[in-house]
Image (tube, rainbow, N blue to C red):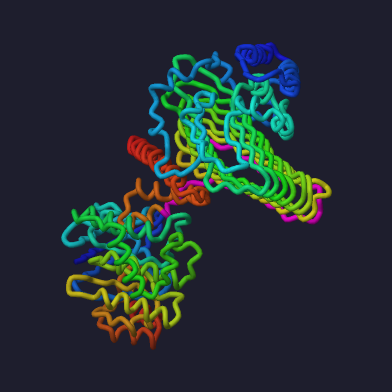
Amino acid sequence: MSAGNEQSRQWFEDLAHSGQVDLPSEKLGWLDDARQQARQAINTLPVPYRKQEEWRYTSIDGLLKQNFQPVNDPFTALQSVDLEDWLLPEMDCYRLVFANGRCVPHLSETSELPDGVRVGSLRAALTTDPDLLATWFGQTANHSQHLFTALNTVLINDGVFIHVDSNVKLDKPIEVLYLSLALEDAVVAHPRNLVVMEPGSEATLIERFVSTGQSVYFNNNLSEIILNESATLIHHRVQDESSQAYHLSNLFLSQQKQSRYRGTALALGGAWARTEYKVKFLDEEAECRLNGLYTVGEKQLTDFHLDIDHAKPHCASEENFRGILYGKGRAVFDGRILVAKDAQKSDAHLHNANLMLTRNAEVDTKPQLEIYADDVKCSHGTSVGQLEPEQIYYMRARGIETAMAQKMLCLGFADEIIDTIEIEPLRQHVHERLHNALDRVVSEQLQAEEVA
Amino acid sequence: MLSIKNLHVSIEDKPILNGLNLEIGTGEVHAIMGPNGSGKSTLSYVLSGREGYEVTEGQILYEGEDLLELETEERAHKGIFLAMQYPVELPGVNNMVFLKESLNAIRRARGEEELDSVKFMQLVKEKAKMVKLDEKLLKRSVNAGFSGGEKKRNEILQMALLEPKLALLDETDSGLDIDALRIVAEGVNALRSPERSVVLVTHYQRLLDYIQPDHVHVLSEGRIVRSGGKELAHELEEKGYSWLKEGAAA
């Protein structure tokens, strides 16, 4: 291992030691064990670098240059934030608000939760529901997936805890709003989430990551999602952060018999954003459908890694990701479907389409199918294209100006993903964000063309 | 309305139009006929402002203004409309949104007030009924997955909605059955007025059974080789185009 790598490891070790963990609970053996293992993993796991396939197109050099500090008190800075500015109009939901990784109970809205539903902070649950946590924590996550997941585990301090009892169906979505406050230091947070859906339960979860200013920070998330038999979770994630933000999300999803997961993953902003989904079917007839959209421009990188493990027969998965790239934006899409030898009648489809608005944008896309069963329906595909001059001409011939035509075509491309969000206020919000971003992009681009 | 003088057009240095002359008066309906490869579509595209067509010589005046100086969308704003032979599919772009944006872009350019959603809906539904376009197609992506006939009807719907001063129809009749043809013709006839001009570009005479032209021109090898009244179309139908070529050569 090179000296450079050892210096990089030091960065992880320093971070692992910098966190001040002051959980309020009694000593919990299972948690200590997990932490202990993760701490060891930090000494032994390989440092991510570009000769490893999973990190081939995604450099972590930018992160390593930062000297991230833990946030001990996000609550003082929070006083100058008006929560109303960050809420979606007409959004009727239960809500958890986090500030730099810490749950803010007085801004959260969970008082009217139906019986059999727990929505709150992981920190609080350590005291109120230690047995539930002991049962489910670490069941699906691999703490040693890589150094970042180990780091998250060592530094567990807070996060989301959702538990829905058997056959309970939530009447309203649960929204989790992660505010990253603009602080002087470059700060880091390691939200740690656990979502457990008991048999036959149903819920909708929305996660939104936003920044209140243009500061440098790092969000290192880890979510464990457990769908027991016949449970249904609809899960929308909107990562829409500061142009200086670093974001890493690791989602571990395990699905029991006949469970259904349907989600959208939207990556709209950040300097460096990587999201990993690890999906595992633990029993038959489970279904996972995930749509994704990323927009990426100047000095930005967005990276999606999907790992879908068809370990059991008769399961269905479908992933459809689209990207709009401009400026010198870079995107990575690495999707892998693994169909095990006995997983007959698997139905698995993976597709990635990219719309390149500029010559200098770059996408590395790699959809893969690994099939060991012989009676399956599987497909994968990828496309990288530009706006068709023919289409622009057609629209201009109808009086629509070039900039507007480009914007409408981009929105049309994105709408095939966005329109799958069934929650009107959220869909509207994403539309608006995209409209604004495209207004900027298209006008900048037309100016650039004029100069050229 | 439109005056084309000695028009020469090339695509990638290959001459397609070779000295075409054409005068279209206000309120007139002209048919331009000709065999495949005679330059009919090129003429339509040059008038609408499609890129890739190089005008090497000649002049086009539209209402006294140099048409070639105008951007594609400016021509639309000033009332030129081309119903295309192959309408383009716009996946993801909702037909209704597209039609509204188109109409309002033109209204804005003319200094007229934009139509709000309610007024627009009323108007578009009325026009869709006129061209017998299934309202479901308004909610779908523009032309995506439409049948040939539906695409053509969508073009006529746009024409009816935008009420152009100069409507060009490029082979709108091709690939249509008789019923669809009649609907398209009705759409064009409804638009006929002393203020509007229509140019029908077609290979076959049959559209002209439904839309009576004031003038018929024959295009061959990039120029108009014969002009006449509507009886010229019948003559062509009987004798075919080769008769004209011989005539021109003689």
- Residue B233, horizontal then vertical, whole percent: 33, 83
Q: Nearer the viewer, residue A124 or A7?
A: A124
Question: Can you say whether A330 is above or below A157 in the image?
Answer: below
Residue B191 percent across, percent down from the top left? 26, 74
Secondary structure predominantly adopted by residues drawn in magenta: strand
Residue B4 lies within the magenta run:
no
Residue drawn at point x = 53 percent, y = 17 percent: A71
Residue A410 screen position, x and y as percent: 44, 47
At x 49%, y 38%, the residue is A295
The quarter of the rendered structure image containing the N terminus of chain A is top right
The answer to whether any part of residue A370 appears in the image is: no
Q: Is residue A373 magenta?
A: yes
**Image quadrant assignment for residue B130:** bottom left
In-front residue for pair A184/B2: A184
**How many numbered circles does the render carry?**
0
Residue B47, position in %: x, y? 30, 61
Tell me which residue sits at (56%, 22%) in the image.
A189
On the rendered structure, is A117 left or right of B43? right
